[in-house]
Image: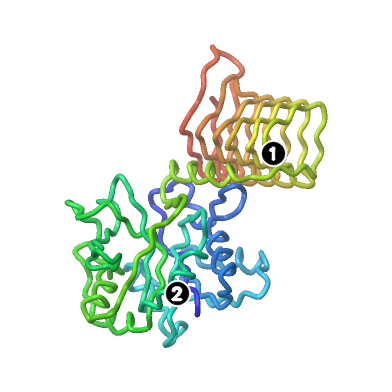
Amino acid sequence: MKGLILSGGKGTRLRPLTFTQAKQLIPVANKPVLFYAVEDLLAVGIEDIGVVISPETGGEVQEALRGHGFPGVRFTFILQEKPLGLAHAVKVARPFLGEDPFVMYLGDNLLSGGLGEAMEAYRRQAPDGLILLASVENPQAFGVAVLDGAGRVRRLVEKPSHPPSSLALVGVYILPPEIHGVIEGLHPSPRGEYEITEAIQGLIDSGLRIEALQVRGWWKDTGKPEDLLEANRLVLSRLTGKIEGEVRESQLAGEVVVEKGAKVVRSRIRGPVHIAAGAVVEDSYVGPYTSIGREAVVRRSEVEYSILLDRAKVEDLPHLLDASILGREAVVVGKGEGPRRFTAGMVLGDRSQVRV
């Protein structure tokens, strides 16, 4: 079985972060979101992986995956010239996929339990296909499934204004090769895309058996800043502490990772917190659910529930920086005056500079 990871799209909901990088490469707990998808496929024995990329960010995605050096993985990069929908991504990947069943995984999704249970159910029940679902509060924002009494998928609707259920497709599918024939006959939807929900509905209408499995644990679509922060929180909540870097005159509580080459000096760290190699935390407080990227700096400041990307810098803030995402080499510097307050919800693109 092959894997197909979708890593295209423009990431408009994550701007300004995605003006200069692929949304799938934005880190959660100091690891690009895309890497979690690759690791999930590897964990169930899938090493032949196609990655659908866009013209805008494809080069960066290729460099990141090849540079990481996933052992045993054979990557095939597939260019999707325009973002014409998930079914269109499968269409352009058909030469790679051939006539075998495959796992399709959206590259900006995170699953707490990985693919193990889904693959076990697929092998045990031997359906033609299987989709993962999760109950959500806003099903109108997703593709939605209607099941019969036996748990089989009967109907799929893409972003319905009046959802027939609360079961959303989470972006992981095990699909049969018959999907290619259905896709060949599709027409663009009113929003101009070839919908995967319509393609899977075509399989069902042709008599194929498509089962559903509801996700245990959590699932996050990291398409918006608040989703990234929540995903960071969820991943860090499973963190196991490990101190390899330098810690001097500091207090560490909870699960804290300080990678080799990082420094924590005269500071207080309350985990879960992940501090990447080369980062410096000095005369500062770093609170729970914060990840600090490589060579980032936090000096004479307080940061909590935030993501600092590589080489970001926070210095001399007179208040707490909370629920914020700072892009690569972004700089936030305090004016050193005024009453104590806090800043929340700041999202800065790469190489931005702000004085607060």
**Left-right relation of 331 to 107:** right
Q: Looking at the rendering, in which quadrant would you find the C terminus? A: top right
- In the depicted structure, whether residue 157 falls above or below residue 103: above
Crowdedness near tag 1: few (<14), some (14–19) or many (≥20) residues, C-alpha within 10 Å: many
Place of residue 187 in the rendered image (x, y in percent of width and height, measured from the top left): 21, 75
Disc 1 element: strand
Judging depth in this view, the residue of 297 and 7 nearest the camera is 7
Judging depth in this view, the residue of 125 and 245 nearest the camera is 125
Place of residue 343 in the rendered image (x, y in percent of width and height, measured from the top left): 50, 26
Mark 1 highlights which residue? Answer: 256
Q: Across the whole image, how many numbered discs are drawn on residues?
A: 2
Give the mark, 1 or 2, whose residue is nearer the N terminus.
2
Mark 2 highlights which residue? Answer: 124
Crowdedness near tag 2: few (<14), some (14–19) or many (≥20) residues, C-alpha within 10 Å: few
Disc 2 element: helix
Name the colouring of the figure.
rainbow
Residue at position x 45%, y 54% from top? 216
Asked which quadrant contains residue 87, the reply is bottom left
- In the depicted structure, whether residue 218 falls above or below residue 333: below
Q: Amino acid at mark 1?
A: Val
Q: Amino acid at mark 2?
A: Arg
For the residues marked 1 and 2, what is the alpha-carbon distance in whole angstroms?
40 Å
Place of residue 105 in the rendered image (x, y in percent of width and height, measured from the top left): 45, 66
